[in-house]
Amino acid sequence: MLGRGPKKTKETTMDKVPMLAEGYESLMADLKALRDERPRIVDAIEEARAHGDLSENAEYHAAKERQGQVEAMIGDIESKVSRAQIIDPTTLTGDKVVFGSTVTLLDDDDKPIRYQIVGETEADAAAGRISFSSPLARAMIGKQVEEEIEVTVPSGDKFYLVEKIEFI
């Protein structure tokens, strides 16, 4: 087995996590809230432990489970924050769709649809913000105005025309 490096994983610790500044601030707020919850969980565990037999103590088990969830979420957020690559779309230029772009597409009925390409933690399709890893964003990245995009979705293939690219 000599000569083999570590197994490749989908996400290595060195991968950058692109996000907008507001996504970074949102993650930091979530991290602060979770860290603030830690002492309350410890208090709940101590209080439940004082009730006696831990094997049948639902409050104790619930508090321990919540502690595990909070610690996992803190670890996940700390990892993303430490690898964050904050991108300000207003500093971008060019004629191609990139991370942070706001793109206006025309569907088959020439109805305009507008999306901003954002980080995974910031995505909210209803608000017009799609993750850079989504099928539609992957199809858009690198395209220019007047280029066609084809996306395969569960209901079939969809076609769009890039009408406008903005960096706002």
Image: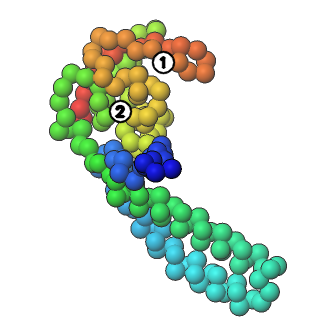
Asked if residue 4 shows in the view, the reply is yes
Q: Residue at x 63, y 81 (%)?
A: 44
Q: Residues within 10 Å of mark 1 (few under 14, many from 20)?
A: some
Alpha carbon distance from label 2 to label 1: 17 Å
Asked if residue 30 shows in the view, the reply is no
Q: Residue at x 37, y 23 (%)?
A: 140
Image location of residue 23, percent across then percent down: 36, 49
Q: Is residue 76 above or below residue 42?
A: above
Q: Residue at x 28, y 48 (%)?
A: 86
Q: Residue at x 31, y 19 (%)?
A: 143
| Drawn side of residue 6 relative to residue 163, left or right | right
When asked about the image quadrant of residue 78, the answer is bottom left
Q: Which residue is labeled 2 in the image?
A: 116
Q: Nearer the viewer, mark 2 or mark 1?
A: 1
Q: Is residue 83 above or below residue 128?
A: below
Q: Which residue appears farthest toward the right when viewing the image?
A: 56
Q: Which residue is labeled 1 in the image?
A: 151
| Drawn side of residue 150 relative to residue 103, left or right | right
Q: Residues within 10 Å of mark 2 (few under 14, many from 20)?
A: many
Location of the C terminus (image quadrant): top left
Q: Is residue 79 above or below residue 56?
A: above
When asked about the image quadrant of residue 119, the answer is top left
Image location of residue 14, percent across then percent down: 35, 51
Q: Which amino acid type is marked by label 1?
A: Val
| Helix, strand or loop for disc 1 | strand
